[in-house]
Amino acid sequence: MAPEAEPGEGRPESPEVESESASEGSAGGSAAAAGRRFTSAGVMIALLLGLLGFTLVVQLRTTSTDPTAAATRQEDLVRIFSDLDSREKRLRQDIESLEESQRQLRSGEQGRQAALEEATRRADELGILAGILPARGPGLEVRFEAGAKPISAYRILDAVQELRGAGAEAMQISAGDRATVRIIASTYFLDGADGSLVVDGRRLTGPFTITVIGDPTTMETALRIPGGVAASVAGDGGTVIVEEREVAEVSALHAPVKLEHARPVS
């Protein structure tokens, strides 16, 4: 008779043993997966750090080799900014001033007053140029004394033209007997008898003095240029005496010119 088998012989292992083996296998797989994930993250971080470092190096090289950035110092940048800021402020002030003038001209009584003041100023200027208003201001007194030859009308006209070219704004000519004639754009000069002059139809005797308003230095320079009025009169044996005046008076008036044919264009 065959012997009876011992209890448990020829049977599969118990479930407890199988469970322990499975647990050990599962733990090993989780550790391997975690290791793989850690390795991938490390590679990604390393790549990002490398890219960041490369970017910083490129930026530093670009900054160090940029001629504009290298040449521009901090104080230069501050000065440039300050200049731009000052220019902006001046432009804003100009704009505000122009806008204020525009508002005054457009606003009721202020506009009428501003327009009246401008018209008055313009009328005064035209009145002085036309010789119908007296004038005063800095200028010269130019006295012509004859020598061997009389002072000719040509010399006086030459002096008037040179003074006008030098910025003269108002003039009159006086004779030795204090007779005075206002000089305007239409004034003419003729030689009279015995060394006299005829100015706008009025006879004047020497010595002659031109009183003129304008910049004294500029006008005197114009009279004394080589070959100019002073030199020409000296060549005739005469003398030109120029005296500066802080306040020159041009008081002679010219009769208003009556226009017969000309009309303003509106």
Image (tube, rainbow, N blue to C red):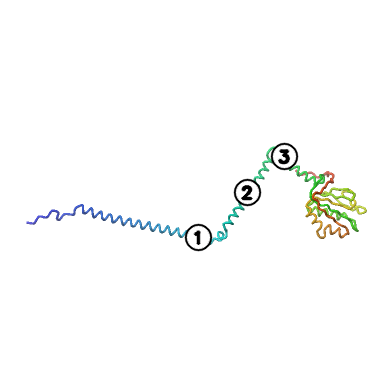
> Could you tell me the amino acid type at mark 2?
Lys
Which labelled disc corresponds to residue 113?
3
Residue labelled with disc 2: 89
68 with respect to 234 (left or right): left
43 with respect to 167 (left or right): left
Which labelled disc corresponds to residue 241?
none
- The answer to whether 98 is drawn above or below residue 240 in the figure is above
Instruction: Return the disc, 2 or 3, that comes first in the chain's sequence.
Output: 2
Q: Residue at x 63, y 49 (%)?
A: 89
**Within 10 Å of the Cα at label 1, are there few (<14), some (14-19), or many (20+) other Cα atoms?**
few
Residue 139 percent coordinates (x, y): 80, 51
Query: Which residue extends farthest front?
Result: 246
Instruction: Please say if the residues under marks 2 and 3 sit with CB atoms less than 8 Å apart.
Output: no
Instruction: Return the disc, 1 or 3, that comes first in the chain's sequence.
Output: 1
Q: CA distance from mark 1 to mark 3?
A: 66 Å
Residue labelled with disc 1: 60
Callout in the foreground (1, 3): 1
Q: CA distance from mark 2 to mark 3?
A: 30 Å
Judge by depth and name the residue closer to the eye, 176 or 97: 176
Residue 60 percent coordinates (x, y): 50, 60
> Could you tell me the amino acid type at mark 3?
Gln
Query: Which residue extends farthest top?
Result: 109
